[in-house]
Image (spheres, helix red, strand yellow):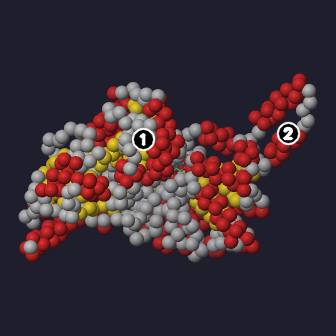
Amino acid sequence: MDHLLSKIESPRDLVGMSNAELAALAEEMREALCNLVSQRSAHFSSNLGVIELCLALHSTFDFSRDRLIWDTGHQIYPHKMITGRYHEFGTIRTKSGLMGYPNPQESPYDLFMTGHAGCSVSTALGLRCGDDLLRPAEGRHSVAVIGDGAFVSGIVFEAMNNAGGLKRKLLVVLNDNKMSICPRTGGLADMFDRMRTTKFYGGLKSEIVHLLDKVPLVGEPVERVLNNFKEAVKAGLHGGMLFEELGIRYIGPIDGHDIRQLRKYLAKVKKLKGPVLLHVVTEKGHGFRPAAEDPVYFHTPAPFVRTNGQVVPLGTGGSSKAYTNVASEAVEEMMAQNERVVVMTAAMCQGTKLEKVRKRFPDRFFDTGICEEHSVAFAAGLAKAGMRPIVDIYSTFLQRAYDQIFQEVTLQDLPVTFLLDRAGVTGPDGPTHHGMFDLGYMRMFPNMVVMAPGDAEDLRQMLAWALTHNGPTSIRFPKANAEGIEGAREPISLGRAEVLKTGRAGTIIACGTLLTECLKATQMLSNKGLDFAVINARFVKPLDAETLLRAISQTPVVVTVEEATLMGGFGSALLEMCGEAGVSAAHVHRLGVPDRFVEHADRGELLSILGLDAAGVARTCRRLTTTVSLHQDAV
Ligand SMILES: Cc1ncc(C[n+]2csc(CCOP(=O)(O)OP(=O)(O)O)c2C)c(N)n1
């Protein structure tokens, strides 16, 4: 059922369509989304919620020249469908297919490649000011669409403050669906809750306040009475006043599923001067009952089919446990053992699987909202007060808090533990979500201990160890099924690696959970008669100089393996160590992520492309062994 949708080649095709036709088109788009999630996991409930808004925006503005930024970008699917990509829509989130986020390489309608929340107002304002300077006669409109979850990011306030001061024409559409991924939290969330239920407000009440401000105040008792009256009136006013006071006209709330109303107000605000915040109320998961009832699960559900309106998951889903589960169980265990342990998430309670912890320890669980910088500084405060905070966060999102890791945590040498989930290749989300850089940026900071568990048991033990260490620590693990190494294990000890296997042909030094791939590689190599040693590095900082330098001195080929950017990562650290120790590292080869952004595809596909799976590691070892023996023969 796509007879309207299949004919939309560009938003120009929406021009002239009636509201009823657009509503019919919206239904076809919903159907397309449902069909997609029957094939693969994808962002779902957020996209269902913005279909009407997307159609209203594209039929009111001309974004082939006006500017449109979807904040975060996970709700970009309807926009992709009507900007010439519907016929490829089925490829979304697959290797060489469409990205699940905006991608300027796909379409001029996507201006920035994004995936991290909170920057839309800033970039839309920048576009506006750039257009004003470079092409003032064109009068291009600039629009940011931002969810209430992303709206609480500190950077949004920085941008709104700037916009209010600059007084440039800018439209910020607040897509208020009451949800981040989980229900939103915080004071602003409460304010939005109140605003959603108040009557439509078009900025008029600010005029009442300005009038009140003009009332002359004379004499002590009169002044007090009037002041009290003014405060009472102001208190009764709408939350939109917050924005009005910043110099931004607030309009709303309006129904985000009523195309007629949306178009009407968009056409009105299009004519207004200065920055405007249009408050649009939507329902996450709108139009598909199970998703509307459980938008958290349906944010990115596993593939399913619909049978009589019921959701039937496809496949068994597998019984294997992910490293994320191992981490959250370990967090729970640590919190049960030690009342000083607290955990924080920046709006990723579901992704980090902390729901059980939230329920069991409500006083020691903190969801800060999408506020990574605040989360880290907040953790530092808790640590200073004597608690043992765990910042459970995706590697890529922690990048936001670089300065707080520096100043609030490492400069003070505070015992904050960073649990970095999704470190390495995350898969179909692509470049904005891969966690490639943490080894580099974490190991730069004095006082920071940087760990990379080799398997699930390492992860558990490292968390327990980190909570006894009197300083900042970080532990990284990927989005992957948890694996375990068989046999007796060394306990975790600061700066000590673990030799898992000896061998004379060469040494593989694994940093992180690719250890299990490295062990598989040694099997493949031994089938070819090559006996390789394997070391589980465990610590990226401090390095186990004794064990690693010995291996480098004693074996003709050394391969380091890490799921992180090679620039500044574990292999780099090893080379620096060799340089300082005066040990030749000419025979050390580093495997990891080269100096480019990695595309979206399944994790397995990407590891194979990067040569980081067992076959890739074995291939490199074989090639290097052959080169070494050719060299020796020549000598
Ligand atoms: C900096 C950053 N932190 C965390 C995330 C993970 N994340 C993706 S979508 C999302 C919720 C966004 O909520 P909202 O903006 O209200 O959009 P909705 O999905 O409700 O439409 C979160 C927390 C992110 N993308 N960027």
Judge by depth and name the residue closer to the eye, 347 or 476. Answer: 476
Residue 354 numbered tag: none
Other residues around mark 1 within 10 Å, as few (<14) / some (14–19) / many (≥20): many
- The picture quadrant where one finds residue 112 is bottom right
Q: Is residue 408 left or right of residue 19?
A: left
Residue at the image point whose x is 73% and y is 59% from the top: 168
Q: Position of residue 289 (x, y in %)?
A: 53, 50
- The picture quadrant where one finds residue 194 is top right
Residue at the image point whose x is 26% and y is 54% from the top: 580
Other residues around mark 2 within 10 Å, as few (<14) / some (14–19) / many (≥20): few
Q: Is residue 530 left or right of residue 407?
A: left
Q: Position of residue 188 (x, y in %)?
A: 62, 41
Q: For mark 1, what is the residue?
A: 410
Lower position in the chain sequence, tag 1 or tag 2 = 2
Q: Is residue 347 left or right of residue 323?
A: right
Judge by depth and name the residue closer to the eye, 161 or 484. Answer: 161
Residue 143's place in the image compared with 230, above or below, is below
